[in-house]
Image (cartoon, rainbow, N blue to C red):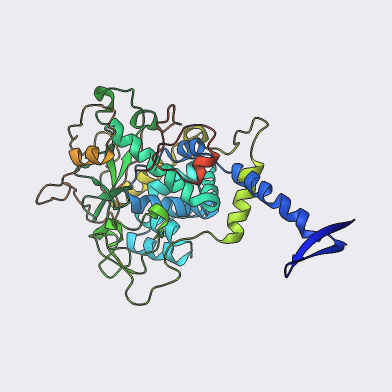
Amino acid sequence: MHHVKSVLLSGALVLWTGTVPAQDSTQATAEPETATAEAALLTQAELETLMAPVALYPDTLLIQILVAATYPLDVVKADRFVLTNAEMDPDSLKTSIEAEGWDPSVTVLATAFPTVLADMAEHVEWTEAVGTAMLAQSEDVLSAVQTLRDQAIETGALISGEAQAVTQDEDDNVVITPTDPEVVYVPEYNPDEVYDNTLGDALLTGALIFGTFAVIDAIFDDNDDWYDYWGCRNCGGWGGGPIIHNPDIDIDIDGDVNIGSNNRPDLGWKPDEGRKRDAQDKITARRDAGGDSKLPLDKAATRPAGADRGDALRGQLSDRTGAKDISRPEAAQRLPQVERPSTRPAADKAQAIRDTSARPATAKKPAVKKPAAQKVATKKPTAKPSALKKRAPAGKTRAAADRGKAGKLKARR
């Protein structure tokens, strides 16, 4: 089709007859297509449901879970490898795990946190959904984690203590680090409780328990890249920063990330562009007629039938070393409960943290008895998390907020 266009050239009005370029119509539809693709990603509410079971984990452990989830098949392989070789001595097992060539996130979970890995393998559908979300919209995932941490602070469930320190960074992000970087505790909690402001103090008492831990200096020596990694305060990727899941840089336990004069362009984890597009397409395709995601966002709903895999693993490790299985109720060494603040609206997140996060002047290690031969002592969560029943307003306004179908985000401080 030919059209007549009026073109102003050097002050003169000229008539031009020609064919309208084909790209004009393409450009006219490009923005709506992009908007449709953005709207099809997981919403804030869906991401909160997905991340609820692990949002209160220490930053550096959480990062390993999030990145390892992008390799769900390797998670299952690593879990089977650890179980099959549970009779191997710890040093040989560590060397054998490293030789498999998995992503560092999978390798370190298999080495230091085998029951966390076992839990991910048991709920592999949920694990795959976490990995898909990380590949497709990692910043939205991290924003949902911050929202959940805000909620847990407001309920009084997330506080500092002997196991962990809860602080804020300069951008108002909630940071969780081990109180003692050499002893990393894994919190166990029910999401229906810790994020619910309607529950009273009685129900929140003991909402987070710390029976599972890894003794870092029994697993890694001071020449290992991972040795000082666990106390890093700047590794979480908050606010668009790098997600440091492989500490092949100088990290000290005070939280600084020192990359020296050679500013490495590859610093931090980023999804491959091809895998990112595939993940976005998968999320878009997995919606029902009503627009709800069909991805397995509820971790509790993905628990397989049959024996507890973690029990089998811990039993073999206990039999091999002769050490007590600390995950058993009669043997578990629980940390003393910390007096919790009264349940309140807690509009001031910073004040809520200040009320509960002061460390003793001379912090002491949690009382952990290190087994002579057992490198890692772990405990399987006894209560399986379930999906969130209620959601408080989000604490961050990012891309997910624009797509959110449920939940209204509060303004960023």
Name, please, the residue furthest toward the left: 361
Image-based side of 337 in relation to 170, left or right: left
Residue 240, position as x, y percentages in the image: 42, 55
Report how many numbered discs are placed on residues in the image: 0
> In this picture, is 359 found above or below 253?
above
Is residue 278 among the parts visible in the rendering?
Answer: yes
Residue 278, position as x, y percentages in the image: 63, 53
Q: Residue 277 falls in which quadrant of the image?
A: bottom right
Give the residue at x 37% y 57%: 111
Name, please, the residue furthest toward the right: 1
Q: In the rendered image, which quarter contains the C terminus?
A: top left
Give the residue at x 24% y 28%: 205
Image-based side of 295 in relation to 387, left or right: right
> In this picture, is 150 found above or below 343?
below
Residue 299, position as x, y percentages in the image: 48, 36
Q: Please name whichever residue, 49 or 384, is drawn nearer the observer in this view of the structure.
A: 49
Is residue 207 among the parts visible in the rendering?
Answer: no
Q: In the rendered image, which quarter contains the N terminus?
A: bottom right
Residue 380, position as x, y percentages in the image: 36, 40
Q: Please name whichever residue, 78 or 131, is drawn nearer the observer in this view of the structure.
A: 131
Q: Residue 311 falls in which quadrant of the image?
A: top left
Q: Please name whichever residue, 217 or 241, is drawn nearer the observer in this view of the structure.
A: 241
Image-based side of 219 in relation to 240, left or right: left
Give the residue at x 41% y 60%: 242
Name, please, the residue furthest toward the bottom: 261
